[in-house]
Image (cartoon, rainbow, N blue to C red):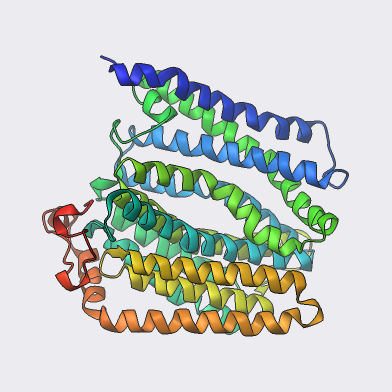
């Protein structure tokens, strides 16, 4: 195999990056092996174990991108979707397990789940649109018609999730429904040949490792998977305990740390990868990765929480029960559902425009900053003020989503038709985006599709 000069130049730097990530996982592993108690140094452990999870998440992402070239595109989609949220699963499932015997952990588990979902849409999606506008002057990103399944099944999962706050519990049958939705989504994605990378689209360690002989590549990929998964398992529990203890030590609500700091740590690698793809002119691929991750988190991650909670209760002799959702968590869930509905509505015509991105980002920042301010300085009246604040933002999301669904109803019907069509026929047909909905310089000839 002939190695290009650019690849030879990238080799030492990329592998140095790989070994740096491995090295950053070591302090957390060593502290865990040494029996370090997070309660004795909560700030130190929060930092060390947080860095371990971030570094391990980078390793997982690189290993998944490398393995994608050796798998069919459908299997690669399943693998990548599971891998990118594994760190988030580790933290949230552990919190849900602890919630079986500790009510405070129940709040943290649901907070972590809602925070991860809102962060992905509220910050992740707009970043891609803003970068495209800044770098290329385009005011919209156009998605391939093969991504119609993302719209349909994300909408299905979001609509079903309305049932959870209405009944006030998160039960095993909710998990079953969400898992079925995800399985149908994956099955529909199996024929999408657009999910695989070529070597020119990869950056960093994956670009180097895909050029290796297959046997060497598979061994390295398996070792990286094993090392990163072990690092996450070693760091997850002390990281969670550090969040609880550090909050009390710093005078910060531990709920805020679980809702925002933990998801930020576990999802940082995905943000970096998508930003790199966008910088390399692959904005459609980057936004598509974020959308796929949202489908994954709103089905598998949400479904894993009641299962972990129920198994924990069963193990401790208290019976397999549904996880109760109190009034404050009902508000968090409605806010997350409302944001998701508007996000799905925004891409129902397979276009994500700059005004939509700014709307999502603006509302996210308002509720993000507002929640922190109210929880930190609201005193005894904090919960009442937070309730009014959350309801207001949720209603605004809902009104915007309803308006968008009504005006884009023809596109929604088309998305459903696309889901039932063969991938080959979709690839041969351009995305049906009418001129009235195209923004600025981003006309049909400049689409990423």
Position of 428 relative to 367 (above/below): above
Would residue 315 be visible to someone looking at this image? yes
Q: Residue furthest right?
A: 40
Q: Is residue 291 left or right of residue 54?
A: left
Residue found at x 52% / y 38% = 58
Residue 284, x across and y down, in percent: 30, 52
Instruction: Identify which residue is drawn at 65% across, 65% down.
Output: 111
Where residue 273 appears, as percent x and y from the top left, is 43, 42
Image-based side of 71 in relation to 160, left or right: left
Q: Nearer the viewer, residue 81 or 252?
A: 252
In the foreground, 188 or 126:
126
**Residue 62 in the image: x percent, y percent?**
46, 34
Q: Nearer the viewer, residue 300 or 375?
A: 375
Residue at horizontal 28 percent and vertical 61 percent from the top: 140
Res 311 visible: no
Using the image, determine if residue 361 lies above or below residue 56.
below
Left or right: 300, with 358 as reference point: right
Task: Reply above or below: 145 against 84.
Answer: below
Q: Quadrant of the N terminus?
A: top left
* Residue 399 position (above or below residue 322): below
Q: Residue 391: horizontal and vertical position, in percent?
A: 58, 83
Q: Nearer the viewer, residue 25 or 101?
A: 25
Image point (65%, 71%), residue name: 371
């Amino acid at each position: 195999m002939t190695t290009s000069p650019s690849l030879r130049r990238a080799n030492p730097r990329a592998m140095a990056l790989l070994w740096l990530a491995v090295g950053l996982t070591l302090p957390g592993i060593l502290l865990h092996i040494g029996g370090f108690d997070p309660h004795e140094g909560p700030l130190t452990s929060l930092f060390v174990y947080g860095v371990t999870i971030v570094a391990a998440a980078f390793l997982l992402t690189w290993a998944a991108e490398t393995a994608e070239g050796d798998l069919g595109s459908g299997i690669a989609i399943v693998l990548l979707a599971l891998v990118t949220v594994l760190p988030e699963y580790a933290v949230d499932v552990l919190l849900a397990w602890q919630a079986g015997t500790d009510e405070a952990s129940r709040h943290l588990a649901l907070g972590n789940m809602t925070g991860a979902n809102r962060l992905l849409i509220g910050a992740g999606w707009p970043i891609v649109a803003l970068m495209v506008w800044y770098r290329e002057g385009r005011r919209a990103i156009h998605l391939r018609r093969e991504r119609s399944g993302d719209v349909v099944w994300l909408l299905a999962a979001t609509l079903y999730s309305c049932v959870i706050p209405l009944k006030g519990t998160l039960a095993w049958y909710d998990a079953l429904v969400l898992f079925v939705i995800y399985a149908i989504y994956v099955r529909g994605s199996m024929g999408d040949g657009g999910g695989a990378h070529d070597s020119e689209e990869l950056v960093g360690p994956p670009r180097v490792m895909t050029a290796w002989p297959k046997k060497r590549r598979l061994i390295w990929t398996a070792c990286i998977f094993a090392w990163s998964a072990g690092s996450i398992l070693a760091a997850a529990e002390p990281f969670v305990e550090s969040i609880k203890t550090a909050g009390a030590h710093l005078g910060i609500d531990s709920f805020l740390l679980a809702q925002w700091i933990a998801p930020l740590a576990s999802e940082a690698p995905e943000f970096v990868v998508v930003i790199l793809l966008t910088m390399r002119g692959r904005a459609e691929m980057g936004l598509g990765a974020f959308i796929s991750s949202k489908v994954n988190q709103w089905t598998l991650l949400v479904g894993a929480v009641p299962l972990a909670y129920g198994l924990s209760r069963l193990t401790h002799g208290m019976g397999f029960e549904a996880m109760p959702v109190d009034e404050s968590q009902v508000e968090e869930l409605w806010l997350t559902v409302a944001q998701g509905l508007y996000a799905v509505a925004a891409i129902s015509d397979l276009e994500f425009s700059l005004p939509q991105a700014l709307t999502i980002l603006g509302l996210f920042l308002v509720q993000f900053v507002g929640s922190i301010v109210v929880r930190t300085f609201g005193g005894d009246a904090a919960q009442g003020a937070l309730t009014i604040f959350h309801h207001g933002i949720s209603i605004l999301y809902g009104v915007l989503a309803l308006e968008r669904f009504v005006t884009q109803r023809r596109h929604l019907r088309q998305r459903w038709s696309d889901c039932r069509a063969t991938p080959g026929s979709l690839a041969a047909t351009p995305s049906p985006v009418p001129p009235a909905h195209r923004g600025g310089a981003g006309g049909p000839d400049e689409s990423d599709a």
